[in-house]
Image (cartoon, rainbow, N blue to C red):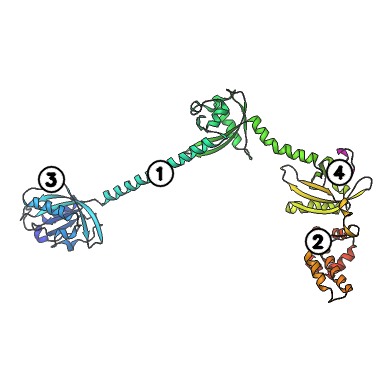
Amino acid sequence: MTTGGSTFWSSGAVPLIEPEFLSSIIGAASDIALVVSAEGTILSVVLNKHSESFGNLKHWEGRPVVQFLTRETAPKFEAAHAAYLQGDVPGKPLELNHSDNAVWQYPVRYTFHRFGQENAALLLGRDLRPIAETQQQLVQAQIALEQGYEARREFDARFRVLLSSTAEAIIFVAVQSGRVDDANEAASALLGVKIDALKGSAFAHHFADRSTVELTESLMNATLAEEGGKVTLKSRKTGRSILVHPVIFRAGGQRILLCRITAEEVAATSADTAANQTLALFRTSSDAMLFMTGKGVITSVNESFLDLVGAAHLTDVVGRSLSDFLGRGQIDLGMLTDPPQRSGQMRTYATKMTNDLGARLSVEISATQLDDQHTQLIGCIFRDVSHMEATRPHGGAAPQMQAEPSRNVMDLVGSASLKDIVAETTDVVEKMCIETAVELTGNNRVAAAEILGLSRQSLYVKLRKYGLLSRNG
């Protein structure tokens, strides 16, 4: 507590209370107390010792009150003080905003009290800053609440538009009560119930032979399935078989089931369309197709593959290893199983097919790794290219070089002899073939030598010749 003008307090204005006690009583009775003279000058300032936010206000004493009031509240004080001097003590509290050197401002609610000496007035004030802060918080909370309501209304509008415009039948079911919280028109049409009657009703009531507890438990169990479970029900109104695909989520502290419902025959039709088309393609394709395990055991083939190998029945092929029908046996099979298992597919691989009668056909094979939960499968497509060999120059020689390498060779004409030009281009082609064979076989040099028709020793000599031994070794 701070106080100034101790001479004033001991001047006998309050003879029944000791001066040191009077100032403490006034300080405890208010947050701030001002003794103001008839001229409007502050004679003394008393602060509550528990209120430290005012700081030191000793410099107020001896100066006019209006010096420490904001511009809009100074006239209010002057009018109230003038009425006080005329003997009319203001009956209502007076709220004033103090300002000190334009550094801080704070509101105070004052009450006027007669002091008994030379028309001096005692102003007991209550600090309104806590109330102002609370009011400000209330205003901000109201603004945030309005913004929340607006966002809620916008979200609800979007939800309603989405729910009404989607063609898929959707129902929201509360787990605790088993009742329908919301649904769209497509769901009401599928169940044969009006939308108003559907909302708020027990979900199990619309299906035959299912209680609320049993249906809720079935739906909850279906949500635990790894790839989205489903529950098959029978509509009580229409008698149709209904598939329910539930998804559980939590909102507002409650668990909600989002149920997508479809007629069983519609779901079966849409699910089987792609499968039926794929199966028809497999059976009727002019290209030979087969499926085999990761170890090369044939699991299924189409008619074109039977024609390709000259087999009469599926039993002649299914269960056997594909290497039995490949010209280089296990070497070719490794080329068709290893790359797909590493990278997912083998785009094109050229080899020859043989059958039990010894006939050989040139084919191009593409292989793809298939995703299957139970076993590893590889799908292969075979294309007979033996009829194309007749159109190739020099009895099936490799196609002509690309335009740019051919032009580079032609640029050598005139600068080197024909023998040197042929020798140089032969080395280039030979190196490219060796690199391709080594890459295709995954650096299996025995298989690469077999593909190129070379002995293993000859392949090592050529690898060393072209500097490929250390790079691929």
Of the residues under marks 4 and 3, which one precedes in the sequence? 3
Q: Quadrant of the C terminus?
A: bottom right
Mark 4 neighbour class, 10 Å CA radius: few under 14, some 14 to 19, many 20 or more: some
Q: On the rendered structure, is 127 left or right of 469?
A: left
**Residue 332 tag number:** none
Can the viewer see residue 81 in this picture? yes
Circle 2 sits on which residue? 436
Circle 4 sits on which residue? 320
Residues tagged 4 and 1 counted as in contact (Cβ below 8 A): no
Q: On the rendered structure, is 244 left or right of 84?
A: right
Of the residues under marks 4 and 1, which one precedes in the sequence? 1
Circle 1 sits on which residue? 148
- x, y percentage for residue 446? 86, 60
Q: Nearer the viewer, residue 389 or 224?
A: 389
Compute the Cα span from label 2 to label 3.
106 Å
Of the residues under marks 2 and 3, which one precedes in the sequence? 3
Of marks 4 and 2, the one in the foreground: 2
As drawn, the residue found furthest toward the bottom would be 415
Q: What span is colored magenta in the figure? A: 308-317
Of the residues under marks 4 and 2, which one precedes in the sequence? 4
- x, y percentage for residue 372? 72, 43
Vertical placement of residue 15 versus 247, above or below: below
Q: Residue at x 64, y 30 (%)?
A: 264
Q: Quadrant of the N terminus?
A: bottom left
The quadrant in which residue 32 appears is bottom left
Q: Nearer the viewer, residue 428 or 20?
A: 428
**Residue 91 tag number:** 3
Q: Residue at x 88, y 59 (%)?
A: 393
Vertical placement of residue 350 versus 59, above or below: above
Which element type, helix, strand or loop, lies under badge 3? loop
Amino acid at dot 3: Gly
Amino acid at dot 4: Arg
